[in-house]
Image (cartoon, helix red, strand yellow):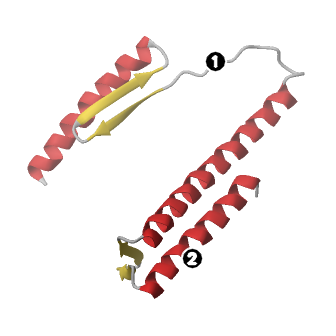
Amino acid sequence: MNKYHTLSILFFIGGLVFFLIGVFTGNVEAGFFLVFPFFVGSGIYSVLGIIFVFIAILLFMFGYASTAADAIGLQFEENKHDVESKKSVKGGGVVLVGPIPIVFGSNWKIAVIMMVLAILLTICTFLAFRFL
């Protein structure tokens, strides 16, 4: 566990403490929907609780990214003596914001492939909403 995970746990506990203080003072209401807990409130304790939990989630994800980057860096250091070649990574993606696709790619060929995929996903989305 690295320092980001430790900070994440501390911020998450801090957010829960703010939610609990809000519940006990009457500014925040808590409940369960199926098995998921939820908090509803408009006071300062609910705002601070949401901010702390959001920061905790960001730190937790950043901790995993940091751990992965360290592992990749160590792997490259080990292979540095064996192979002295330049490697490039090519990739792309599609983000659907509602029915609107956002396409990105590292080169033109991948971007065109992602555009075709975006059109197919948009058609599938419209068909799913139309017939389901």
Instruction: Check the picture and name the quadrant holding the C terminus.
Output: bottom left
- Mark 1 or mark 2, which has the lower sequence index? 2
User: Residue 119 or 70: which is nearer the viewer?
Assistant: 70
The reply to whether callout 1 and callout 2 are in contact (CB within 8 Å) is no
Instruction: Check the picture and name the quadrant holding the N terminus.
Output: bottom right
Answer above or below: position of 45 versus 72.
below
Within-10-Å neighbours for mark 2: few <14, some 14–19, many 20+: some
Percent x, y of residue 96: 31, 38
> Amino acid under label 1?
Ser
Q: Residue at x 39, y 71 (%)?
A: 43
Q: Decide if residue 52 is on the left or right side of residue 116.
A: right
> Amino acid under label 2?
Val
Percent x, y of residue 75: 80, 34
Answer above or below: position of 115 versus 85.
below
Question: Of circles 1 and 2, which is in front?
Answer: 2
The extreme left residue here reads 130
Q: Decide if residue 99 is on the left or right side of residue 84.
A: left
How many discs mark residues in the rendered view? Answer: 2
Mark identifier at residue 17: 2
Q: Secondary structure at mark 2?
A: helix
Mark identifier at residue 88: 1
Answer above or below: position of 108 versus 44.
above
Q: Secondary structure at mark 1?
A: loop
Q: Classify residue 73 by image quadrant.
A: top right
Q: CA distance from mark 1 to mark 2?
A: 46 Å
Q: Classify residue 46 by image quadrant.
A: bottom left
Q: Residue at x 17, y 48 (%)?
A: 128
Within-10-Å neighbours for mark 1: few <14, some 14–19, many 20+: few
Q: Residue at x 53, y 63 (%)?
A: 53
The extreme bottom residue here reads 24
